[in-house]
Amino acid sequence: MRTQVAIIGAGPAGLLLGQLLSASGIDNVIVEQRSGDYVLGRIRAGVLEPVTVSLLEACGAAARMHRDGLPHEGFELCTGGQRHRIDLQALTGRHVTVYGQTEVTRDLMQARADSGRSTVYEAEDVRVLDFDDGSSPRVQYRLGGELHEIACDFIAGCDGFHGVCRASIPADRLQTFERVYPFGWLGVLADVPPLSHELMYVRHERGFALCSQRSHTRSRYYVQVPSSDRVEQWSDAAFWEELKRRLPDDAAERLVTGDPIEKSIAPLRSFVAEPMRCGRLFLAGDAAHIVPPTGAKGLNLAASDVGYLWQALVDFYKGDVSGVDGYSARCLQRVWKAERFSWWMTGLLHRFPEHSPFEQRMQEAELAYLLESDAGRRVIAENYVGLPV
Ligand code: FAD
Ligand code: DHB
C-alpha cells in the first residue's frame, strides 16, 4: 500500500490529523494497535480550548460538539474552604467547552468512516522504518499474522506516551526532560448531576480535588492520592467520603453520589522530548510530551501540534518546505508554555509530601495573592483558555 502520510495511533491526535489532511486532499492511512471500542473506552480529558474547537470545525467534526458541548465562561478555585471564581469570559473574552475526549474521538471516528478513509485497527508489532535518511519511509505491521507494509512520504507519530514512534528515534537524536510527581488522580465517572454548573478545583490540606462534568447528568470527580495507591484499595464509599472531606461545606452537602461507571488512577508526569521531528517522522501529542492534568492542557496541546503539522504538510505539497522544517521549534514554543502552566497549577493546588510547613504557607500565600489580584486572575485565565497559536 502507498499513501502520502502514514499516521500511527488513532487517539484524538491521529484522528484529528487524518481528518484535517483528508479535508485538504492529502491521502493518509491510520494504523492503531487497539480496537476502536478500546480507544473509546478510555475516559480522559473533558475541557476543550477554543483552538481545539476551531480545528474540529475545520475538519467538519464539530456539529455534535456544538450541540451537546457545554460552554463554560468561568471556573472556581477553592482554598481554605472559600470559593473564588475565575471569570474566563471577562478576563480573556473567551470561554472553554466541556465535551469529553471520548465524544471528540467518537465524532472523529464517525467523520472518518463517512469519508471512507482507511483505519487499520488491532495492528500488531507496528514498526516505523527508513524515516531518517530522507526519502522513503515505511510502516510495517501484522494483522491476523500477516505482514503488511505502507510506503509513504511522511510518518506522523500520534501514538501516545508509550508508543513506538518516539522509541524508534535513535537515543542520541533526542533530548528528554521529565518530572514524575509523587501522587496521582483517582477519578470517578458517574451518572449523577454535577455539583455546580462550573468546574471546581480544590486545594485542601488532605490533597487536591476536582469536580468536573461531561453533561448535565454525568459528573467526573478526581481526588489526589499517593502514587503507591491502587484503585482496588478505594471502595466507592471511601472515594465519595474523601471527596466530601475536601470540598467546602456547602458543596459537600449538595454533592450527589452514585455508582461509578468508571474508576481509575492516573499518574502525574511532566515530560518533553526535543526535537519533535527526526527526518520524515514527526511526533505529535502525548508521543512528544505529557503534562500533569491540572491545567486541562494534554488534549489541547495534542490538537495544537496537529494544527501546526497539518499546515506544514499542506505547505509542503504546495512546494514550501519551511513549515516542515520549522515544525518542531514552532510546537515546542507553545508546548513549554503549557508545560509551565500545568506544572505551576499542579504545584499550587496539590499537597506535596516533601513540603515543610514553611513551603505549605508559601503555597497558600501565593494562591491567596493571585486570587486577590486582577493581574493574578488574568494570568490563570489566559493560560487556562489557551495561549495563542
Ligand atoms: P493518546 O490518546 O494516548 O492516543 C494514542 C493512540 O496510539 C492510542 O489509541 C494508542 O492505543 C495508540 N498506540 C500506542 N502505541 C501504538 C503502536 N505501537 N502502534 C499503533 N498505535 C499505537 N487533556 C486535556 O486537554 N484536558 C483535560 O481535561 C485532560 N484531562 C485528563 C484527565 C486524565 C485522567 C488523563 C489520563 C488525561 C487527561 N488529559 C487531558 C490528557 C489527554 O487525555 C491526552 O493528552 C490525550 O489523550 C493525548 O492524545 P494523543 O492522541 O496524543 O494520545
Ligand atoms: C477534567 C480533567 C482535567 O484535567 C481538568 O483540568 C479539568 C477537567 C475532566 O476530566 O473533566
Image (cartoon, grey):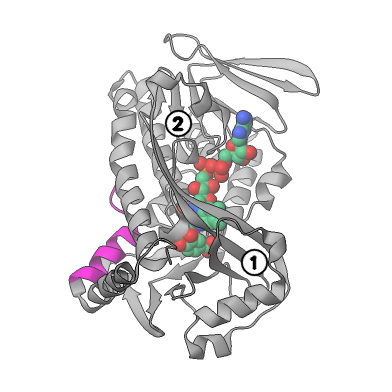
User: To which residue does mark 2 refer?
Assistant: 283
Q: Classify mark 2: helix, strand or loop.
A: strand
Q: Is mark 2 within 8 Å of ligand 1?
A: no
Would you place residue 296 above or below residue 323 in this image? below
Give the alpha-carbon distance from disc 1 to disc 2, as whole Å: 31 Å
Q: Classify mark 1: helix, strand or loop.
A: strand
* Magenta stretch, residue numbers: 375-389
Decide: few, some or many residues near mark 1? Use Cα within 10 Å; few <14, some 14-19, many ≥20.
Answer: many
Residue 187 position, x and y percent, is 60, 64
Name which residue type carries label 1: Leu
**At x 28% / y 23%, what residue is drawn?**
322
Residue 134 position, x and y percent, is 42, 10
Residue 249 position, x and y percent, is 50, 89
Residue 189: mark? 1
The answer to whether residue 10 is seen in the rendering is no
Closer to the camera in the image, 200 or 108: 200
